[in-house]
Image (cartoon, rainbow, N blue to C red):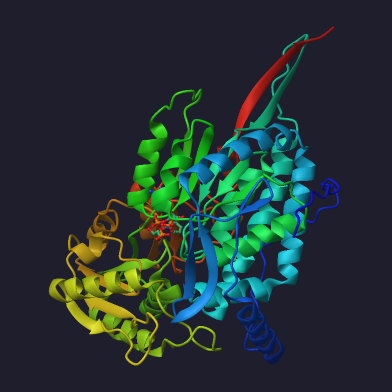
Amino acid sequence: MNPTTTKLAPVDASTLPPYAPTTYIDYSQPQNRSAYEQALATVRAAMGQEAPLVIGGERFKGSKTFESTNPARPSEVVGRFQLATTEQANQAIETAWRTFATWSRVPAAERAAYLIEAARRMRERRNLFSAWMTLEIGKSWGEADADTAEAIDFMEFYAREMLRYDRPDPLVQMPGEKDQLVYLPLGVGVVIPPWNFPLAITVGMTTAAVVTGNTVVLKPASDTPAIAWQFFQLMEEVGLPPGVINFLTGSGGVVGDPLVKHAKTRFVSFTGSREVGIGINKLAAEVQPGQIWLKRVVAEMGGKDGIIVDDEGDVAAAALGVAQSAFGFQGQKCSACSRAIVVQKVYDEFLTRLQAEVAKLTIGEPDQYGAWMGPVSSKNAFEKILSYIEVGKQEGRLIAGGQRIAGKDGYFIEPTVIADVKPDARIAQEEIFGPVLAVIPVKDYDEALRVANGTDYGLTGAVYSKNPHKLERARQEFFVGNLYLNRKCTGAMVGAHPFGGFNMSGTDSKAGGRDYLLLFLQAKSIAEKIG
Ligand code: NAP
């Protein structure tokens, strides 16, 4: 396809309905079920194709190609993608830089129109986008649908947010002056998402940067380039000018450094592991020859999220909430509960109830209806998680799971619970990013809060207690970016639960919140003498 620019009519804020989160599809309904089966068949028929790099709307080959495969059946190739070179990374930044000159001058309401139109088309093809995720990264139908719904919500929300930032700022007016504050885009951004929310996070990070008037180089995660490619093509289809988003696949270890280092890179928007985030932050801080700004780094990183089960809490609800938070999408969410911190008085009851909840979880091929859990993302992840389970067996008592699922080629691991874990054990401190839960007994609520706060991270956390004083203490003392009271700690909704963490979980950039777009803007104050 030859990309063309379509000038869209500016969004009319007065006719735009208020933002509301997308509701999920109920696949127990036969018509929804057959629609998803059809979407899976359509995606299967489209799989295996080669995608190019796209820089300034032009298609390029890289040095070699790599394959993206289905983690449920690793011999199945989902797509072939280019390994970009350092030169191509530099070329992409230069192109984005040239495009910035024009895109930054496009009125905000026109920029927002591209997001609204893309959201509309994604909504129309919702099951297709989700089916790519089921086949490329092993998301169950429900998890894939939630990911697509979040992507739609990010676009709808950020479009409206841009219109809000575009309205006059209510400044104090000095006598004899017209005083104004306007928000300008920053410049060229490098967008580096992870594979675990391969549509929602990719779309959210990219469209937030673009709707604010920046241009970007999008470097998708190498485990999920196919879904990123679907999104990129959608933005071409709605007529976004070439060069606003440049699509550059390849190894983060190879193209990451040149993208981050480039003197014309103005900001880096990263979501991924702590290790990579720290490296990016360090490299971005080095001022390169010719660079005339300090780069802004938005880094959202890992978690070691804890749920406190208090002796004044609903233990049955807590067991269900912990099981859902720990094992949804195989525990591969930054918000996943990987530590249940349980007050001694209800410890045995909690373990019994948790085992019962875990026993109910269905594991199977994610392209089949009814599989609540599927495979983990890759061979590397599979091996790493199994080795952590071995560590866990030494550090505590295995009470559920602990094995790979026999007879499958894919990377399936049982939901695993290890009880009697000490707060400083490796499995209670290190992010495993898989279906492994450590249960830590504590003597009382004071100790529970201390243990909950006793990691390097601070992303999500939850407390199950009916005691309002204890909940109030959690509000004040539980040091996490996203705190949940008497509910699970996953499932943040755009607009309702702005998402981002403290400490080594990141820069607390609150995706899906009203502060988020400011990260990609700079304010200019203008005072004009009048009269
Ligand atoms: P990752 O290994 O850090 O990779 C994330 C992205 O960084 C990928 O696109 C990767 O590319 C790229 N990358 C790798 N090395 C790089 C380098 N040297 N320079 C620049 N980019 C580089 O993380 P992941 O395994 O994809 O994602 C899981 C992690 O993300 C977990 O720690 C999870 O907690 C975190 N996460 C956090 C949030 C949040 O909001 N806080 C949300 C989701 C996930 P390649 O794929 O090519 O290596």
Residue 316 falls in which quadrant of the image? Answer: bottom left
Instruction: Kindly give the residue lying farthest to the left in the view shown.
Output: 394
- Residue 158: x and y, percent? 66, 49
Give the number of marks.
0
Q: Name the side, left or right, on which 447 lies relative to 242.
A: left
Q: Is residue 512 visible?
A: no
- Residue 416: x and y, percent? 29, 79
Residue 199 falls in which quadrant of the image? Answer: bottom right
Q: Name the side, left or right, on which 106 lies relative to 469.
A: right
- Residue 472: x and y, percent? 40, 54
Residue 335 falls in which quadrant of the image? Answer: bottom left
Q: Nearer the viewer, residue 219 or 295?
A: 219
Which of the four quarters of the rendered structure image does ligand 1 lie in? bottom left
Q: Nearer the viewer, residue 210 or 345?
A: 210
Q: Residue at x 66, y 21 (%)?
A: 525
Q: Residue at x 35, y 75 (%)?
A: 435
Which corner quadrant holds the C terminus?
top right
- Residue 97: x and y, percent? 62, 35
Q: Name the side, left or right, on which 448 lies relative to 199.
A: left
Which corner quadrant holds the N terminus?
bottom right
Q: Is residue 162 above or below residue 360?
A: above
Q: Is residue 465 visible?
A: yes
Q: Name the side, left or right, on which 270 lies relative to 40.
A: left
Q: Is residue 448 above or below residue 41?
A: above
